[in-house]
Structures are given as structure tokens and as C-alpha cells.
Image (tube, helix red, strand yellow):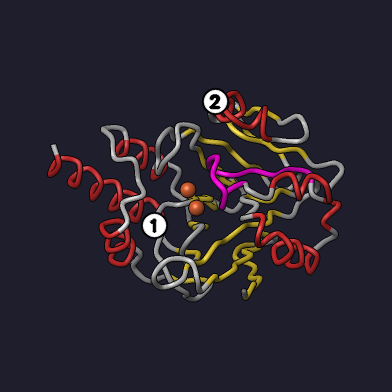
């Protein structure tokens, strides 16, 4: 396994591990470290990648400084290693959406989690993480995302997922490869809410999309998200 560290916005680091054995062409798993008075890690990664991710964090700051652990939804690559991180960071707590805490995290988390309401801002001191509930987008009833307001970075989780290995950052078009991957491996729970939920994210006008399984993208995020939303809308119409 190979883990790389890239600063994608001021004091926001992408930690990326490529696993060649995952899927037909390998698969890349990204976590994001938001450094502030109360640092937050978005996605923990799998338990199997804990040592790699912890080592990358240590290049930036002592892991014991972590205060918050966030993720999109309850799934192994999103939060599999949360208890490993809690054991190394004595002041850290998981911060997840209210529904997700009620469904799974209250039981799965070794330390009492913080349950966030839709639109609630977690003020990290220097960075502001707004939690947005996005049920079933891209999958999981508890799904939600964070928007960091000072840098206009949307931590967009599994949206625009592709397989393989690629550069850390890009400004080139996301749609073609993401659509090809989604068509081959339809991981999104396609419902009447998919298009309007992604359109709601577009209203945030993000400048950076920090993606879990793709390069971090810079540009007019509202255009990219509206394009994706429209594609899901058309796909749903073609199926019903
Ligand atoms: Fe997922
Ligand atoms: Fe994921």
C-alpha cells in the first residue's frame, strides 16, 4: 500500500492510499485532515489502513491532537477505524448526523459520539464545518456531508467515485469517468431525492470538491454538481 499526503486547501490535507488488490483496477481511499484549534479527520479509512493513515497524520501533527472524527455514512471505508483513532486520541469524539448516531454509532463507537443536526456548524476554531444531511445520497440512510465554510471546500464523500490510481488534484472534467464507473458499479441509491439533494449541495457554490475516491477537484463546484444531479435525474427517468 502506498499513502500520500497533499495539502489541498490551506491547512486541509488529503491522505490517500491506493490498494491495487481492491476491485478490477485497484481502488483509492482518501481521508481529509482539517487542521484548526480542534482538528478534525473526515473518514477514518479501513482498519487495515489505520497505520498508513495515522502515519500520514503524524507528518502534520501529533495524532493525540485530534478532536473530531467525522464521516459521510456508516460503512467500513468511511469509519471502520474510528475506535482505533479514539484509542490514540484521548480527547477525540465522533461527530455524526443525529440519525446515524441513533441507528448505529451509539452502539459501534467506543466513546460517546456528538450527534449533529442538519445544517449545524461544528466550529473548529479557524475552520467551520457545516454538516448537511443527504439521506441515501450517495447511499446509506444516515448519509451526510460536511462543507468547510472558510475555504468553500465540500467534503463530498463518495460522489464522483472512480476506480484506479490518479493524481491528487485536478481541474479537468469529472463527469466522464465518474459516470462510466457508476454505470459499471451502481453504488448510488437512486431515488426521486437523488437529483434535488445534489442540487441542494450545488447551492453552496463550493470551490473545492474533496472526493473520497477521486482526485480533489477545483473549479465551479455548483456547475459540476448540477451536471451530476441532472445525470442522476435522467438515469432515474430512464429506469421508471
Ligand atoms: Fe460509501
Ligand atoms: Fe467510500
Query: CA separation, marks 1 and 2?
Result: 24 Å
- Provide residue 83's location: percent of width, then percent of height: 74, 44
Which residue is rendered at x = 62% and y = 46% of the image?
79
- Provide residue 168's location: percent of width, then percent of height: 53, 72
Q: Secondary structure at mark 2?
A: helix
Answer above or below: position of 113 versus 12. Answer: above
- Provide residue 157's location: percent of width, then percent of height: 50, 50
Instruction: Give the quadrant of the C terminus.
Output: top left
Q: Secondary structure at mark 1?
A: loop
Q: Residues within 10 Å of mark 2 (few under 14, many from 20)?
A: some
- Provide residue 32's location: percent of width, then percent of height: 63, 57
Number of on-image labels = 2
Instruction: Give the quadrant of the N terminus.
Output: bottom right
Disc nearer the start of the sequence (1/2): 2
Which residue is rendered at x = 35% and y = 46% of the image?
188
Which residue is rendered at x = 67% and y = 34% of the image?
108
Are dots 1 and 2 in contact, CB under 8 Å? Answer: no
Image-based side of 134 in relation to 47, left or right: left
Residue 125 image-quadrant placement:
top right
Q: Residues within 10 Å of mark 1 (few under 14, many from 20)?
A: many
Q: Tell whether position 234 is magenta.
A: no
Q: Is the shortest distance between ligand 2 and the CB of mark 1 under 8 Å?
A: no
- Residue that numbered label 2 is attached to: 99
Question: Over which residues does the magenta segment extend?
Answer: 67-79
Q: Is the shortest distance between ligand 1 and the CB of mark 2 under 8 Å?
A: no
- Residue that numbered label 1 is attached to: 160
Residue 47 image-quadrant placement:
bottom right
Image-based side of 116 in relation to 188, left or right: right
Mark nearest the camera among 1 and 2 is 2
Q: Nearer the viewer, residue 5 or 108?
A: 108
Q: Residue 72: give its label.
A: none
Which residue is rendered at x = 49% and y = 58% of the image?
211
Amino acid at each position: 500500500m502506498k499513502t500520500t499526503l497533499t495539502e489541498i486547501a490551506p491547512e486541509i490535507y488529503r491522505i490517500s492510499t491506493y490498494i491495487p488488490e481492491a476491485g478490477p483496477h485497484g481502488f483509492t481511499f482518501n481521508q481529509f485532515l482539517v487542521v484548526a484549534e480542534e482538528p478534525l479527520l473526515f473518514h477514518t479509512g479501513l482498519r487495515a489502513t489505520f497505520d498508513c493513515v495515522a502515519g500520514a497524520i503524524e507528518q502534520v501533527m501529533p495524532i493525540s491532537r485530534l478532536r473530531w472524527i467525522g464521516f459521510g455514512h456508516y460503512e467500513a471505508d468511511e469509519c471502520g477505524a474510528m475506535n482505533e483513532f479514539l484509542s490514540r486520541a484521548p480527547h477525540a469524539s465522533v461527530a455524526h448526523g443525529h440519525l446515524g448516531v441513533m441507528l448505529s454509532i451509539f452502539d459501534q463507537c467506543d466513546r460517546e459520539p456528538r450527534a449533529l443536526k442538519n445544517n449545524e456548524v461544528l466550529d473548529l476554531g479557524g475552520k467551520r464545518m457545516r454538516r448537511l444531511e443527504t439521506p441515501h445520497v450517495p447511499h446509506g440512510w444516515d448519509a451526510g456531508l460536511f462543507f468547510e465554510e472558510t475555504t468553500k471546500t465540500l467534503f463530498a464523500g463518495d460522489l464522483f467515485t472512480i476506480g484506479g490510481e490518479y493524481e491528487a488534484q485536478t481541474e479537468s472534467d469529472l463527469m466522464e469517468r465518474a459516470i462510466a464507473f457508476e454505470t459499471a458499479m451502481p453504488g448510488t441509491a437512486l431515488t426521486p431525492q437523488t437529483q434535488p439533494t445534489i442540487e441542494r449541495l450545488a447551492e453552496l457554490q463550493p470551490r473545492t470538491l474533496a472526493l473520497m475516491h477521486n482526485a480533489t477537484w477545483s473549479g465551479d463546484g455548483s456547475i459540476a454538481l448540477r451536471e451530476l444531479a441532472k445525470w442522476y435525474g435522467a438515469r432515474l427517468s430512464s429506469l421508471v
